[in-house]
Image (cartoon, grey):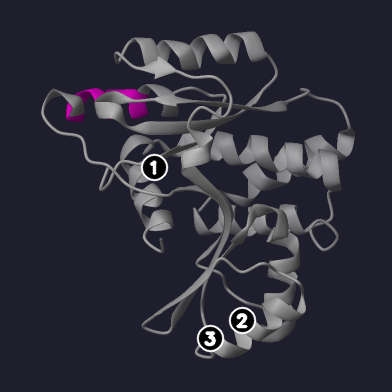
Amino acid sequence: MGRAYQNRKESMAKTSDMKAKVYSRYGREIYVTAKSGGTDPTGNLALRSLIDRAKKEQVPAHVIDKALDKAKGGAGEDYSPARYEGYGPGGSMAIIECLTDNPNRTFGDVRQAFTKTKCKIGTQGSVAHMFDHCAIFVFSYDDEEAVLEALMEADVDVSDIENEDGKLTVFAPNTDYFKAKQALLDLCGDIDFDVDEIQFVPQSYTTVSGDDVALFEKFLSMLNDLDDVQQVYHNVENA
């Protein structure tokens, strides 16, 4: 399970290597998160985590500040989340998360990525049941038992904790994200998280081969080229 976050990071690096696209996605997500939960990161834990993540991805300060200023102004686009799922090349499965100001356009664009790679977009829930919607935290700490105890005292339903070379990976239900993060901060102080996000983690992995390899790469590339697409999750090993 612990490899899931690394698999997806590598996938995104391969299929979305244009910095401008990364900046745009973070800018949009910061704007939406600040607009809905407040522009002060100390009072908006989701925003604070997002800004920290953006800085790790080397998103420039002016991109972050512009998104926050836009949210403070109260005007601007009215984005809403949209999620699509379906079957990719070679029987793979994918979940695509978007922020859109035009759901009809976004659905059409995502569907085209499926149809042009001989894939099938599904209905809501068609593949999501094959993924776990997890909060994932990765950080340096050497006392696994103390972390587990702190999380249990905070009433967090811990799914798993892995310890590898002094790096702890904590998995919890996505609904326990804020409780889990606060419990970790209370225990460990100001943690520099390697990973601090909510992801869809596949319950099992598959491999694609032959002609499906090129089709899968095209599938990911088409999706990641779409401005409205924020994240792509899939169950392909080493993709």
**Where does residue 154 sit, x and y in percent of width and height?**
77, 75
Which residues fall within the magenta stretch? 213-221
Residue 6 horizontal/vertical position (percent): 38, 57
Task: State whether the magenta stretch is mostly helix, strand or loop.
Answer: helix
Mark 3 and mark 1 in contact? Answer it, CB < 8 Å: no
Q: Is residue 9 above or below residue 71?
A: below
Q: Is residue 164 left or right of residue 35?
A: left
Considering depth in this image, is 16 or 181 the residue closer to the camera?
181
Q: Quadrant of the C terminus?
A: top left
Q: Nearer the viewer, mark 2 or mark 1?
A: 2
Residue type at the position of mark 2: Leu
Q: Is residue 90 magenta?
A: no
* Label 2 crowd (10 A; few <14 / some 14-19 / many >=20): some
The residue that label 1 is drawn on is: 12
Q: Amino acid at mark 3?
A: Glu
Q: Position of residue 134 (x, y in %)?
A: 57, 54
Label 1: few (<14), some (14–19) or many (≥20) C-alpha neighbours in 10 Å: some
Q: CA distance from mark 3 to mark 1?
A: 30 Å
Residue 81 bears which disc, if any? none
Asked which quadrant contains residue 97, the reply is: top right
Q: Residue at x 81, y 56 (%)?
A: 44
Task: Kindly report the distance in space between the C-alpha atoms of the residues bearing marks 2 and 1.
Answer: 31 Å
Q: Residue furthest left?
A: 210
210 or 189, nearer to the observer = 210
